[in-house]
Image (cartoon, helix red, strand yellow):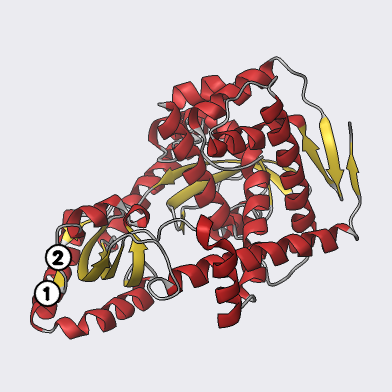
């Protein structure tokens, strides 16, 4: 499965699959590639290429061949990456990627109900079935990044690339140089205690005989599982956040945990069944919502920073790095960023600022307050080695890295069992 958002193409592919029997098209090592996987990948390629989705067209047939080759390559890399101890994908990363993926599908198709109708199953079930695919996708990307980060490029190589491709290079886009300070609205002791107390009351209700699924449906803040009584289905070890796994895998059958905290909030978990390294669990999540006082604390801090940098603008970058190290958030220095790559809530607050000026404090959609300092903008231009060296260098590096990565995959294929079925 190619885990990217593709709206109506996603819907068309599932409707098409309803009329076709799924089957194995290829085996790579211990992994199978299904016809449904290839069709979804082909739909994504069709969208990117502006090609119609008519399965009988020649062009679509060509895209299907490309999609199969891509999935074979992906599984080849997965076979190697899974054994690489330096390439690690955490349960938190899998859960976050799943939420972004499904959220994107819901946004493009229109609603959770329409998505569930298109795929013929609940979002919870779809998420559970997609976990392994998300894990593979993330592992592939991390292995690719690790490989490409080792690739460098020389000035003569950049010049050679430019001389060969200068007539087909796209214009360098307009960009902006800016720095950002982000101060999160962190839940304080009172906010955490509110969530904890709520789950302690839930446990009292469970102990008095109230059904777990009824309470999960009514009170859980996990939208993916609340509607089905908090059930997450069977999940293998390694695909859940660490804090959740440490508790869930230690429970006995039907045992209910005490409340515990994860990056998502506080949970109560019940183990329903165990099959080797897989467990079937249900949970009730209570997110930790910052209080109005927590919000005011962050607002006071960002206002204080704003008043300081107005008088000491040269300190903005060092403060941005300080907050980046402290909170591991979007604080930092951004050079030559294209407008389309800037989150809307940031762009809306900086696009009309003059050069060398600081924005007023503004609230993001990430539960934080921000300040931005604009250094300058550059206009779109036809690239040359004189006016767009960094832009051309980046294109040349990407071209070289992709070429070497393709060669690496070809090398890896020599040592892995691959069978394609006609």
Does residue 254 appear in this view? no
Q: Is residue 19 above or below residue 100?
A: above
- Residue at horizontal 29 percent and vertical 60 percent from the top: 187
- Residue at horizontal 53 percent and vertical 19 percent from the top: 117
Q: Is residue 189 above or below residue 2?
A: below
- Residue at horizontal 49 percent and vertical 58 percent from the top: 169
Residue 419, horizontal then vertical, whole percent: 91, 43
Quarter of the image with the C terminus is top right
Identify the element where label 1 is drawn: helix
Residue 58, which numbered label?
none
Of the image marks 2 and 1, the number of the one nearer the N terminus:
1
Residue 278, horizontal then vertical, whole percent: 72, 46
Q: Dot 1: within a 10 Å radius of its alpha carbon, few (fewer than 14), some, or many (20 or more) residues?
A: few
The residue labelled by disc 1 is: 304
Q: Nearer the viewer, residue 166 or 49?
A: 166
The residue labelled by disc 2 is: 359
Q: Quadrant of residue 180?
A: bottom left
Q: Quadrant of residue 48?
A: top right
Q: Is residue 225 above or below residue 377?
A: above
Residue 185, horizontal then vertical, whole percent: 25, 61
Q: Nearer the viewer, residue 82 or 153?
A: 153
Residue 60 as seen in the image, left or right of residue 119? right
Q: Nearer the viewer, residue 40 or 362?
A: 40
Label 2, label 1: how many angstroms apart (C-alpha)?
Answer: 14 Å
Quarter of the image with the N terminus is top right
Residue 72, horizontal then vertical, whole percent: 78, 47
Q: Is residue 422 above or below residue 357?
A: above
Does residue 81 appear in this view? yes
Identify the element where label 2 is drawn: loop
Q: Dot 2: within a 10 Å radius of its alpha carbon, few (fewer than 14), some, or many (20 or more) residues?
A: some
């Amino acid at each position: 499965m190619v885990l990217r958002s593709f709206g109506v193409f996603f819907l068309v592919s599932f409707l098409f699959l309803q009329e076709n029997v799924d089957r194995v098209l290829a085996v790579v090592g211990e992994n199978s590639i299904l016809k449904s996987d290839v069709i979804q990948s082909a739909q994504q390629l069709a969208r990117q290429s502006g090609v119609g989705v008519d399965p009988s067209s020649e062009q679509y047939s060509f895209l299907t061949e490309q999609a199969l080759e891509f999935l074979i390559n992906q599984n080849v890399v997965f076979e190697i990456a899974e054994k690489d101890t330096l390439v690690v994908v955490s349960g938190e990363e899998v859960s976050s990627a799943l939420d972004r993926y499904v959220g994107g599908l819901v946004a493009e198709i229109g609603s959770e109900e329409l998505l569930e109708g298109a795929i013929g199953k609940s979002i919870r079930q779809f998420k559970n079935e997609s976990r392994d695919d998300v894990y593979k996708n993330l592992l592939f990307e991390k292995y690719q990044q690790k490989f490409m980060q080792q690739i460098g490029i020389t000035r003569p190589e950049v010049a050679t690339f430019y001389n060969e491709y200068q007539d087909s290079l796209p214009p360098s886009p307009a960009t902006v140089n800016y720095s950002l300070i982000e101060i999160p609205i962190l839940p304080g002791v009172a906010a955490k205690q509110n969530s904890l107390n709520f789950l302690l009351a839930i446990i009292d209700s469970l102990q008095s005989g109230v059904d777990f699924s009824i309470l999960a449906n009514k009170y859980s803040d996990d939208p993916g599982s609340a509607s089905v009584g908090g059930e997450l289905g069977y999940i293998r070890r390694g695909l859940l956040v660490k804090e959740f796994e440490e508790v869930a895998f230690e429970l006995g059958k039907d045992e209910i945990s005490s409340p515990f905290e994860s990056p998502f909030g506080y949970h109560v978990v019940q183990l329903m069944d165990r099959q080797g390294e897989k467990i079937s669990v249900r949970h009730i999540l209570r997110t930790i919502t910052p209080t109005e006082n927590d919000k005011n604390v962050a607002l006071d801090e960002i206002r204080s920073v704003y008043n300081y940098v107005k008088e000491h603008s040269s300190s903005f970058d060092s403060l941005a790095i300080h907050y980046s190290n402290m909170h591991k958030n979007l604080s930092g220095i951004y050079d030559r960023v294209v407008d389309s790559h800037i989150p809307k809530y940031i762009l809306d607050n900086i696009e009309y600022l003059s050069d060398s000026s600081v924005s007023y404090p503004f609230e993001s959609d990430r539960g934080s307050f921000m300040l931005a300092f604009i250094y300058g903008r550059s206009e779109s231009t036809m690239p040359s080695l004189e006016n767009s060296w960094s832009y051309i260098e980046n294109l040349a590096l990407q071209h070289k890295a992709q070429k070497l990565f393709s060669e690496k995959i070809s090398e890896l294929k020599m040592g892995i069992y691959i069978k394609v079925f006609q």
